[in-house]
Amino acid sequence: MKDDQPRGHCLFASLCACASPRDSNNCCIVFCPRPPVSPIRQAPAAPTRHAAVPRKMDANIVVMGTESVGKSAITVRLLTRRFIGEYGDIESIYSHSLGRELTLNIWDSPYSEDLSVETSLFEKKVQWADGYVLVYSICDRASFNSVSRLIETIKSTKDYVGADKGPIAIVGNKRDLHHRRTVLSEEGRLLARNTDCHFYEVSAAEDYHSVRTVFHGLVDRMKDAKLTSKRPLGFRGIVRTMSAVFTRRRTDSF
């Protein structure tokens, strides 16, 4: 096969300056530099969004009532789901976790017939509390009357009047002893209605769920009132170890 062009003639002679190097056929050798490669620019990574960790909040509840009404039994029933019938005359603050967002601090407080004797301590309780559980025995008329006086004293305390008013739950305990009842359920409801409180009847001895309902409902009302802002728990001098009441501490969440 014959070449279309004479040998020694550069096919691209008209296009090149012929100053380029030549091959054995007198054709210019053209160097074609590789076009510069632009660096690949990666898009900046989107900022990582971390889920906001909710701040742990405290809700403080004071439990009050006369002797032998079962206020300590109610508190320990909530904490351990167990019923313990006998307690010494101790004053304690317990911490109970309600999930990851809330710690419930419960001040189990002995009752003093003469509130003026402990006026300073009583005012501290009112200042500290976000809510109240006032316990009486449905078998003890005097304990019911004491709850009425407690409500009046709490509401007349300057710290209660000057602060956001915490909800109050009136609790008639020992519902299982209905055959010994001296205080009717209607009387408890009427007292709650007249004092703008909430009313429950429970049996700490027989029913954990009724006790749970008291505290669960009170916490819900405190949340509604936005009373769960974090603040330090004081009065360390009165805190007793829970081993004085039961041998093993157990935390249950609602």
Image (cartoon, helix red, strand yellow):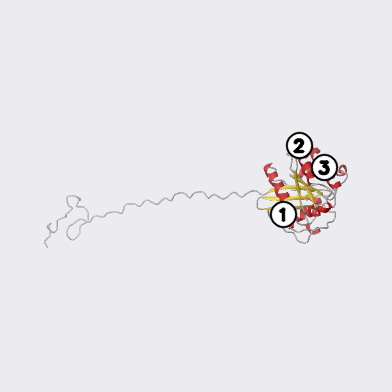
Please say whether residue 228 is visible from this viewpoint.
no
Q: Mark 2 and mark 3: span between their CA atoms? A: 21 Å
Percent position of residue 237, x then y: 81, 51
Q: Quadrant of the N terminus?
A: bottom left
Q: Position of residue 53 (x, y in %)?
A: 61, 50
The earlier-in-sequence mark between 1 and 3 is 3
First-in-chain label (2 vs 3): 3
Instruction: Where is residue 92? Give x, y as percent.
Output: 80, 52
Mark nearer the N terminus (1 vs 2): 2
Q: Are marks 1 and 2 in contact (CB under 8 Å)?
A: no
Q: Residue 77's spot in the image, x, y percent? A: 76, 56
| Three-letter amino acid code of the residue under disc 1 | His
Mark 2 vs mark 3, foreground winner is: 3
CA–CA distance between discs 1 and 2? 34 Å
Residue assigned mark 1: 209
Identify the residue shown where x is 78% and y is 39%: 194
Question: What secondary structure is found at the residue carrying circle 1?
Answer: helix
Q: Is residue 201 left or right of residue 34?
A: right
The tally of labels here is 3
Pointer 2 residue? 162
Q: Residue at x 87, y 42 (%)?
A: 116
Where on the picture, by quarter, is residue 156?
top right
Whether residue 107 is visible: yes
Q: Amino acid at mark 2?
A: Gly
Q: Give the number of the mark in front: 1 or 2.
A: 1
Mark seen at residue 25: none
* Kind of residue at disc 3: Ser
Q: Residues within 10 Å of mark 3 (few under 14, many from 20)?
A: some
Q: Secondary structure at mark 3?
A: helix
Q: Which residue is mark 3?
A: 148
